[in-house]
Amino acid sequence: MRRLGEIALIAEYLAPLAAAEGSFGLKDDAALLTGLPSSGLVVTADAIVAGVHFFEDDDPADVAYKALAVNVSDLAAKAAKPLGYLMTLAPSEAPTEDWARRLSSGLARAQAAFGISLFGGDTVTARGAWWMSITAFGEAPERGLVPRPGAKAGDFLYVSGTLGDAALGLKLRLRTLEADLADEEAQFLRRRYLYPEPRLALRAVLSAHASAAMDISDGLALDLSRMCAASGVSAEVSVPQVPLSQAAKRALTSKPEEIQTILSGGDDYEILAAVPAAKALVFEKMSVEAGVLVTRIGTVVGGSEPPEFLDRNGDPFAVASGFEHFKV
Amino acid sequence: MRRLGEIALIAEYLAPLAAAEGSFGLKDDAALLTGLPSSGLVVTADAIVAGVHFFEDDDPADVAYKALAVNVSDLAAKAAKPLGYLMTLAPSEAPTEDWARRLSSGLARAQAAFGISLFGGDTVTARGAWWMSITAFGEAPERGLVPRPGAKAGDFLYVSGTLGDAALGLKLRLRTLEADLADEEAQFLRRRYLYPEPRLALRAVLSAHASAAMDISDGLALDLSRMCAASGVSAEVSVPQVPLSQAAKRALTSKPEEIQTILSGGDDYEILAAVPAAKALVFEKMSVEAGVLVTRIGTVVGGSEPPEFLDRNGDPFAVASGFEHFKV
């Protein structure tokens, strides 16, 4: 099978993804962004590493899709409109044509789904597992960024979609979840791990009504504690209110302890938002109109303690902390 | 020795580098760039990998400095003014405090030298050698970008500084260069490998007078062939005109075959520019005023053949091609 050099990889498989004028067909060292929004540019970076964020033998189309999706998820949480991205791609050996075609097709699919295009980047050789690092930029909303640190005591806490599916899907792939699941339920969970859905449809709602927002990538427990710490507040979350898919509910029926996975497993890429109580109704209504399920899971409260999780009786419920790279 | 978790690394060693308002002290997933230049934003990405771009046991201060310098060099080649950067940092294990302090100090030094600051990024665990990927952005010059593909037949070809020092310095470190050098000459070459000098002082000159420009990162031979291919032209280079440092000249005295290293070794991060003949004098004068040595090395000619290198008699001089990642 033909293996590609760096120049062929860029010319044949990456340049077709770079349609925007300022990307110069990837023939230059740098790209030019013009017609910049007066509201500002939101920029974010997220990398994924084989063996850490995905499996070595995963289809590069899926890996590439997810790499772009997790970056766009950060833009969505800031209510920013995706514009473009730069990608540093590091295969651990000269890629085959098949690998390059799959990678390129996954990126093309994600680009079409999220309305974003490739502007430039770099290709290097990884020493060890292959990885890619993406920097994405988007148009800031007219009324300013939805900050992470804006949560205030009294705000309602909302999450989009359902939580824990991806973390359960990962455990299925790792064969560390032995719940009693139908085939299509297992498939659903695995798919939720591979294909995050950046909640771009919530941009207008978040921009208009959220006092703070972020995407949940490292588990609700850790990410909520980050939002609270950044905002100088605490929170109470009602565990029974956390929205679950049918598949996740089914997994809990046979393995109730998996609620820990759901609350702290990560890879959700759903939105966590704090919304002033007075705006809660309109926030819910606009979200429904945008076609995205949002669910109130708790309340922001004063104080500097870590967020508290409560069971159905209102008693404290101990939750493991979320994912941290190179934790010590 | 204390090892740092991800949260401590960011809060204690990276957040102090993020002074700009829109970086939110690295407490958010995304940064906000406001007051964007009407001329546009130049964006570029370059990654470096231990064992590929630097040695595993290099001081992280030097590695970090170089990582930022090579990105700023791309901005300089486009005549763009550095504004900010995002960094994805991938240590292969939980870093020690000493490692983090060195890394941070190298970045701080580069930030001060180049007038750029940290806006955000990501931290992940590398599986294998450690690496970092940087995306830098700068203000485009008012009169538009200096393109790589703009070289025209008849243009003079210039390079800044001296070529080959870094490639010779690398060979010294690899102990594959056995030239007869004084200690300070060897030290000079090694230092040129570690500390590229982005030619920001040439921004105004390039913007005003160059028809094409790029920085030389993969060797003059390969990078000139890229400029020519992008521009649909060819070129003639007079090898004796290529500017050399005293140390490089000395190396050539005992090892004349090292001219190949000089012409195709890479890591120069000097500027290669095509300048219309009619503007050559003012280009040279302005460069001198900017304090940067520029030297005419040849001429752009019509045709689609690879650039030709000529010896002092005007006869063809065979040059090895430059560095390509995962070449096949």
Image: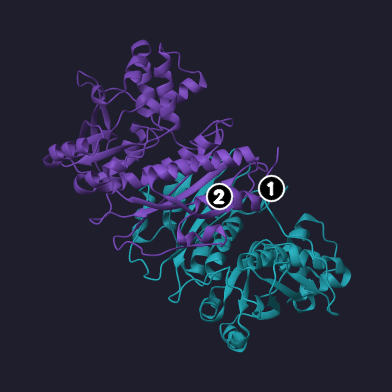
Chain colours: A cyan, B purple
Q: Can residue A33 be seen in this view?
A: yes
Is B18 or B241 nearer to us in this picture? B18
Dot 2 falls on a residue whose secondary structure is helix
Q: Is residue A95 visible?
A: no
Taking the image as shown, residue B242 lies to the left or right of residue B20, namely left
Is B40 or A208 nearer to us in this picture? A208
Q: Which residue is drawn at 37% across and 10% down?
A: B254
The image quadrant where one finds the N terminus of chain B is: top right
Rendered image: mark on residue B14: 2
Dot 1 falls on a residue whose secondary structure is loop
Measured as percent of width and height from the top left, residue A147 is found at: 54, 69
Measured along the vertical axis of the image, is residue B191 above or below residue A299?
Answer: above
- Estimate how packed mark 2 is, as few (under 14), some (14 to 19) or many (20 or more) residues with alpha carbons within 10 Å: many
**Nearer mark to the viewer, of 2 and 1:** 2
Disc 1 residue type?
Phe
Q: Which quarter of the figure has residue A164? A: bottom right
Disc 2 residue type?
Leu
> Which residue is the site of mark 1?
A326
Taking the image as shown, residue B86 lies to the left or right of residue A224, namely left
Specify the subunit that label 1 lies on.
Answer: A
Is B55 or B277 nearer to us in this picture? B55
